[in-house]
Amino acid sequence: MPDWKRVVSTHLGLKTIHEEEVRELAAHLEENYEEHCSRGLTEATAFAETLQEFEDCDVLVKAIREKSREEVMNYRTRSLWIPAMITLLGASLSLMILQKTGFRPNLIWKGPIAVLFYVPWLASLPLVGAAGAYLAQRAHAPISRRMLVATSPALLLLIIMSIILPLDMIVDGFWWFRLVYFTVAVVNWVVVPGLALLLGVAPFLRRASQPIILNEA
Amino acid sequence: MTKRIRSQIARGSGELAILSLLAERPLYGFEIAKQIGERTGGALKFTLASLYPLLYDMEKRGWLEAHWQANDAGRDRRYYKLTIAGRRQLAPLRQEWRSFFHALDALAGVSHA
């Protein structure tokens, strides 16, 4: 019996990313071949007859590629972008609500730079991180993606701060103290909140319960 | 008749054939092709290359949904099932084709040919 999956992949030039389609088309060819054999054709003739099914397959290849592309995009949206947006919204809302309700940041150290920690906000972040990780896990995201989703608010802040620092230096000139200030701000707004968000991922570090068919490679 | 019109007719008739078959029960690709061939006495014939682009497109438009299930022989097959949206498409599509054949009959007398 020919290896129909291999026949399909070779004839249509498909990769592992099209696994489901290859499996489906291989099953179709297999039954087609068996039917030819049951009509009394030799294996070689039945095989040649079955290959006729590939005639004018350009449209099919295009349809499969388009289908896979959309599935990958949908998967990425469900497992990364939507959970990350919700996590970001949750972190922003919790900070906003705490500020509106009168919670003030706690002064940890006061020297040339004041080090402030927003303790109630930091305490709320594991819940926010957990929500993001849960949504990503539900969409069968791998563990690394769940962690990325949960820490997305901290990562976004890091990106914004990394853009502001050089711009600031271009406008106001280089100043060592600015670098120190930047480092403290990174610890305050990226490292510590990031760790708090990561705490929420802990219950969602199990491997995906179902295998992910899609391979984004 | 241009190639474009020819392919649109083929596509339209394929959609109607698939929707009509799946309105009866869920089927997988090979069964769909086989039944269309048998029921039309071979007048309509689908190959792998012509059937699956249609199925994938109809699935994308939400007319069909697919799931893997073992067939009678115990082999896993991807079964297609009509959705509510697909079922809604069936009546207008049938009407469209009826009108098309009436028009063609009035013009060329195809039913008496």
Image (cartoon, rainbow, N blue to C red):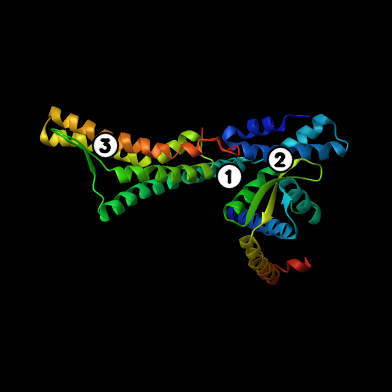
Residue type pointed to by label 3: Asn
Q: Position of residue B61 (x, y in %)?
A: 57, 55
Residue type pointed to by label 2: Glu
Badge 3 local density, few (<14 within 10 Å), some, or many (20+)? some
Left or right: A106 in relation to A30:
left
Name above or below for residue A21 compared with residue A180: below
Q: Does dot 1 land on a helix, a strand or a loop?
A: helix
Left or right: A96 in relation to A128:
left
Q: Nearer the viewer, residue A128 or A179?
A: A128
Q: Does dot 3 land on a helix, a strand or a loop?
A: helix
Subunit that carries the residue with mark 3? A
Can you identify the residue that label 1 sits on?
A63
Can you identify the residue that label 3 sits on?
A188
Q: Residue at x 76, y 48 (%)?
A: B31
Q: Earlier in the sequence, mark 2 or mark 1?
A: 2
Question: From mark 2 to mark 1, how far is it between C-alphas?
Answer: 16 Å
Residue type pointed to by label 1: Ala
Checking the image for residue A146, the label placed there is none
Q: Nearer the viewer, residue A25 or B40?
A: A25
Badge 1 local density, few (<14 within 10 Å), some, or many (20+)? some
One can see residue A163 in this view:
yes
Q: Earlier in the sequence, mark 1 or mark 3?
A: 1
Q: Position of residue B50 (x, y in %)?
A: 66, 47
Q: Residue at x 81, y 52 (%)?
A: B38
Can you identify the residue that label 2 sits on?
A53
Q: Earlier in the sequence, mark 2 or mark 3?
A: 2
Name above or below for residue A107 compared with residue B16: above
Q: Nearer the viewer, residue B75 or B101?
A: B75
Q: Does dot 2 land on a helix, a strand or a loop?
A: helix
Left or right: A32 in relation to A14:
right
